[in-house]
Amino acid sequence: DEYRMMKDDKPVGIGLLGCTGSIGTSTLEVLANLGPAFRVVTLAAGRDGAKLAAIAAGLPEPPALLACSLQQPVRQEDP
């Protein structure tokens, strides 16, 4: 299968813009089903900061960057 990683391969980093919309959430589901070959490293949303934070919290590894066009930044608490 072309999406399977070799033992020493690193996952492909994915930046997802519009992650809170229907296409973004569908994309996250597809990535989750593809397994460890892909890793979400960046998430961005237009307005829904709460949903953005919830999506980030549900990922296996926290993304390196969260971005939302709110007046106040969305921050993810360190585990």
Image (cartoon, rainbow, N blue to C red):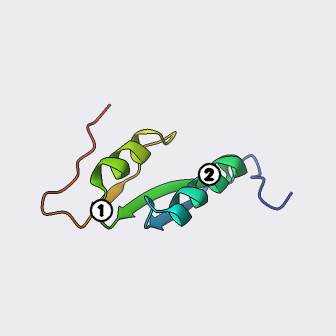
Q: Quadrant of residue 66?
A: bottom left
Q: Describe the element under mark 2 as helix, strand or loop.
A: helix
Side of 20 relative to 38 (left or right): left
- Label 1 amino acid? Ala
At label 2, the amino acid type is Glu
Q: Image quadrant for the C terminus?
A: top left
Q: Which mark is residue 67?
A: 1
> Depth check: 69 or 4 in front?
69
Residue 63 in sight in this render: yes
Q: Residue at x 43, y 58 (%)?
A: 20
In front of the other: 51 or 78: 51
Q: What's the residue at 47%, 39% (across, down)? A: 58
Q: Residue 48 at what x, y percent from top left?
A: 31, 57
Q: Judge whether 6 appears above or below 15 on screen.
A: above
In the rendered image, residue 44, in percent from the top left (x then y), is placed at 37, 63
Farthest-out residue, front: 22
Is residue 62 left or right of 72 when viewed as pictured?
Answer: right
The quadrant the N terminus occupies is bottom right
The image shows residue 12 at horizontal and vertical percentages of 60, 60
Question: Within 10 angstroms of label 2, few (less than 14), some, or many (20 or more) residues?
Answer: few
Disc nearer the start of the sequence (2/1)? 2
Q: Image point 38% across, 43% down: which residue?
A: 54
According to the picture, the residue beneath numbered tag 2 turns out to be 29
Q: Which mark is residue 44?
A: none
Secondary structure state at the residue bearing disc 1 = strand
Q: How many angstroms separate mark 2 from mark 1 (CA)?
A: 20 Å
What is the residue that sits farthest to the top in this orientation? 79
